[in-house]
C-alpha cells in the first residue's frame, strides 16, 4: 500500500523514483542502477518529513545532479489537507540518496506539479487541492504564492457539482519552461496559461485546449515535451489529444488522437527527433 510509482527520473546510471501511499501511510524514494538492473537505495520519506502521502509532482532537474520534487501530505485529524513539502534529492556515485526538506511552499496545500527553470535557480508549481501557483527561490528559499489560476466559483460548480470531479481530475498536472524562461500550464476549465517570471504576470490564452465534444471539463495537460526548435508539445487528459504550441505566435495546433485511449500521461523526444508518448 506504499509502492505505487508516481514520479520517475534518470540521472546518470540511476533511475530515481517516488511513490504514492494509501491514505495514512507514507511514501518512498528509491534508486535503481540501469547497468546492474538492481535496486541500490530505498528511503522512507517519513524519516525526513512526517505525515506525507505521495510524491506525484514529478522530478525536475536543478544544478549538478540535484533533483527537486514536491509532496502531498496525509489529511489532518480533522480531515483537512496537510502541509506538502518541497524536497531536494541528491544521488551520489553509488546510487545512495540524500534527501533534504526545503519546507512548505503553500500552507495547508500539497505540491501537485513542479518545474525548474533552465538555470536551476527557481522552482514553479501548482498547489493541491486549491490550485495556487507558486515560485520558490532555491538560493534564498523565498516563496511567492499567486491566486491567478485558482478555479473560480463558477468553474468549481461545473467541475465538482455537475460533473463530480475532484482536484486530482482538473488541476494542471504538468508544467514546462520555454526557451525564454516563460512557464506554461493548464487551468480549469480547459484553459492554457503562461507565467512571466520577470514581470510576475499571467497570460490566460483565449484559445482553449483541443477537445472532443462533451469532454471539455476533463481538459488539462498531463504531459509536456519541448522540441529542438522550441515548439512545445502537450498531451490533453480529456480525450488523449496531442497538440503543438508555438510560444512565439501563441498558436495552438490540434494534432489529433495518436491512439484510441484517453490521457497522454508521458511525452518525450528520442534521438531521432520523433516524439514518443504513453496513453
Image (tube, rainbow, N blue to C red):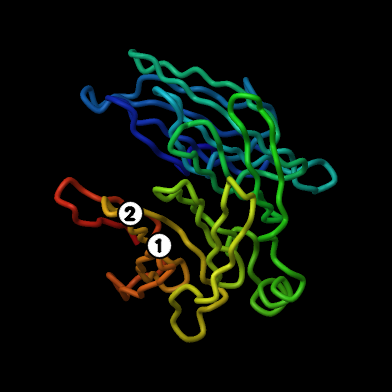
Q: Nearer the viewer, residue 131 or 47?
A: 131
Q: Quadrant of residue 95?
A: top left
Mark 1 falls on what kind of element? loop
Which quadrant of the rendered structure holds the C terminus? Answer: bottom left
Q: CA distance from mark 2 to mark 1?
A: 9 Å
Query: Around disc 2, counting alpha carbons within 10 Å, would you say few (fewer than 14), some (14 to 19), or many (20 or more)?
Result: some
Check residue 134 in the rendering and tell me which mark sits there, or answer none.
none
List the single residue furthest toward the right: 78
Query: Around disc 1, counting alpha carbons within 10 Å, would you say few (fewer than 14), some (14 to 19), or many (20 or more)?
Result: few
Asked if disc 2 and disc 1 are in contact, CB closer than 8 Å, the reply is: yes
Please name the residue shown 79% across and 41% down the image.
Answer: 76
Picture coordinates of residue 106, whole percent (x, y): 72, 42
List the single residue furthest toward the left: 272
Above or below, 95 relative to 85: above
Left or right placement of residue 163 versus residue 96 in this view: right
Picture coordinates of residue 72, whole percent (x, y): 63, 42
User: Which mark sits nearer the N-terminus, 2 or 1?
Assistant: 2
Q: Nearer the viewer, mark 2 or mark 1?
A: 1
Picture coordinates of residue 168, whole percent (x, y): 60, 58
Q: Quadrant of residue 245?
A: bottom left
Please name the residue shown 71% across and 51% down the image.
Answer: 146
Q: Quadrant of residue 167?
A: bottom right
Q: Nearer the viewer, residue 191 or 55?
A: 191
Q: Nearer the viewer, residue 101 or 166?
A: 101
Check residue 248 in the rendering and tell me which mark sits there, or answer none.
1
Residue pointed to by mark 2 = 230
Picture coordinates of residue 174, whole percent (x, y): 49, 53
Please name the residue shown 27% across and 25% down the image.
Answer: 13
Please name the residue shown 51% across and 75% down the image.
Answer: 208
Mark 2 falls on what kind of element? loop
List the single residue furthest toward the bottom: 213
Amino acid at each position: 500500500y506504499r509502492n505505487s510509482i508516481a514520479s520517475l527520473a534518470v540521472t546518470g546510471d540511476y533511475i530515481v523514483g517516488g511513490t504514492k501511499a494509501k491514505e495514512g501511510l507514507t511514501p518512498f524514494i528509491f534508486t535503481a542502477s540501469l547497468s546492474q538492473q538492481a535496486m541500490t537505495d530505498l528511503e522512507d520519506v517519513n524519516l525526513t518529513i512526517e505525515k506525507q502521502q505521495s510524491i506525484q509532482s514529478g522530478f525536475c532537474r536543478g544544478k549538478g545532479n540535484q533533483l527537486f520534487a514536491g509532496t502531498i501530505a496525509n489529511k489532518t485529524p480533522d480531515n483537512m489537507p496537510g502541509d506538502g513539502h518541497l524536497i531536494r534529492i541528491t544521488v551520489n556515485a553509488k546510487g545512495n540518496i540524500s534527501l533534504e526538506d526545503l519546507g512548505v511552499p503553500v500552507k495547508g496545500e500539497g505540491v501537485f506539479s513542479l518545474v525548474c527553470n533552465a538555470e536551476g535557480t527557481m522552482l514553479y508549481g501548482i498547489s493541491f487541492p486549491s490550485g495556487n501557483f507558486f515560485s520558490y527561490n532555491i538560493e534564498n528559499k523565498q516563496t511567492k504564492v499567486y491566486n491567478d489560476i485558482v478555479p473560480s466559483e463558477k468553474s468549481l460548480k461545473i467541475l465538482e457539482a455537475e460533473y463530480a470531479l475532484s482536484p486530482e481530475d482538473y488541476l494542471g498536472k504538468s508544467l514546462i519552461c520555454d526557451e525564454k524562461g516563460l512557464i506554461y500550464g493548464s487551468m480549469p476549465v480547459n484553459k492554457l496559461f503562461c507565467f512571466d517570471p520577470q514581470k510576475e504576470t499571467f497570460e490566460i490564452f483565449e484559445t482553449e485546449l483541443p477537445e472532443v465534444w462533451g469532454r471539455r471539463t476533463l481538459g488539462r495537460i498531463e504531459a509536456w515535451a519541448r522540441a529542438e526548435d522550441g515548439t512545445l508539445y502537450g498531451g490533453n487528459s480529456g480525450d488523449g489529444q496531442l497538440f503543438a504550441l508555438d510560444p512565439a505566435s501563441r498558436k495552438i495546433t490540434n494534432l489529433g488522437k495518436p491512439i484510441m485511449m484517453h490521457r497522454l500521461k508521458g511525452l518525450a523526444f528520442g534521438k531521432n527527433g520523433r516524439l514518443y508518448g504513453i496513453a
